[in-house]
Amino acid sequence: MDPVIALLRDLVAIDSVNPSLVPGGAGEAAIADRIAAALGAAGLDVEVSEVGPGRPNVVGVLEGRAPGRALMLCGHTDTVGVEGMAAPFDPVERAGRLYGRGAQDMKSGVAAMVDAAARLGAAGGLSAGRLVVAAVADEEHASLGADALVRGHGADGAVVTEPTGLAIATGHKGFEWVEVETLGLSAHGSRPAEGRDAILHMGRVLTRLESINARLITGPAHPLLGTPSLHASTIGGGRELSVYPDRCCLRFERRTLTGEPADVGLMEVQQALDELREEDAAFEGSARRLFSRPAYEIEHDHPVCLVLAEVVGRQGRDSTPTGMSYWTDASVLGRAGTASVLFGPSGAGLHGTEEYVEIDSVLTCRDTLVDLARAFC
């Protein structure tokens, strides 16, 4: 078995569900230990630091023999939950695929970058420059790991090894989470004159949000990222069947493009609430932003993009830049001064009940990162 697949199997077998998403989740401590051991065995200087209780980052550094550029390889070690999965931590190989939670998102990318460093170390290291390998916590929630990483480490360029299908992705969308509350008046279900239905009032808000989304997805598109979008995520309200609900709470997500304001989703829904209040003086509703992360794009002529495209082109594969619909830690790195591109293995089942990675793509990703490090550094 190729060492990168052996490592990937070990990583998938370790429960690293993000406890901020799933109460009681195992977190990243055990998987950090395995990665630290692999980097240490490869001869890298290894640093393990907690970004939260029991939630460590692992950073390994391989110094070259002469001055040169620094390249960072970065990936996250946490996963989403496993509800509905029969054997999420049992790495099963079938028809050229490896199945399990995190196999695609993104333990395959982490295995590829760690084994790339191991290959470089075994071959005598780097002739010049520096390689920084960072396995960070909490990307699936608030990116505590990436935020901590950029306070202590930077590079001339970075590759975030999220699953891109071996495409070079030079940008990705951002997101904003918004909470909307409508208020009603509690009353007996048989007395409509005394009650006001907060849930029906939220229905008016949902209609407006549906119209906003229709406008977004049919509007101007970014050449790589497509259009922004909006979806309702969770909703709740009411107490009993025979009681008018006095409160309803909706949370929605707005996917954003580069150049859009950080609070664009909040502004859109606040305009809708203002219009509803003008139409009905009895309507009560408010909104607040919960959290947001900006979209990101790197210039296509940045050296890390150009060198990666050259390496991929030499392999006979398409090096045309593309964009990703999901958010990644590349945005955190880029905004801190480490320009970042996305490149990682192929697979399917992101956050689904059947997740897998194409095994051959993990090998290709690893080999590409080795060649990139030599050329870029």
Image: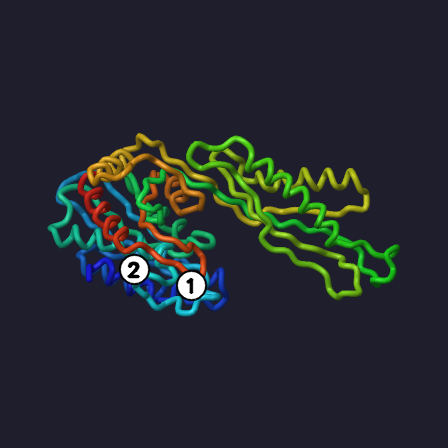
Where 94 falls versus 369 (above or below)? below
Q: Which comes sooner in the sequence, label 2 or label 1?
A: 1
Q: Residue at x 35, y 62 (%)?
A: 99
Residue designated by label 1: 17
**193 left or right of 118 in image:** right
- Residue found at the far front of this picture: 95
Q: Which SS class for mark 1? A: loop
Query: In this rendering, which labeled residue sits more in front, label 2 or label 1?
Result: 2
**Amino acid at circle 1:** Val
Give the x, y percent position of residue 347: 35, 52
- Residue found at the far left of this picture: 124
Near mark 1 (Cα within 10 A), the count class, few <14, some 14-19 or many ≥20, is: many
Q: Which SS class for mark 2? A: loop
Residue designated by label 2: 95
Residue 331: in sight, yes or no?
A: yes
Find residue 159 and report its image quarter.
top left
Q: Residue at x 43, y 69 (%)?
A: 86
Find residue 303 and report its image quarter.
top left
Quadrant the N terminus occupies: bottom left
Numbered mark located on residue 81 in the image: none
**Amino acid at circle 2:** Ala
Near mark 2 (Cα within 10 A), the count class, few <14, some 14-19 or many ≥20, is: few
Give the x, y percent position of residue 211: 64, 39
Give the x, y percent position of residue 227: 50, 37
**211 left or right of 177 in image:** right
**239 left or right of 105 in image:** right
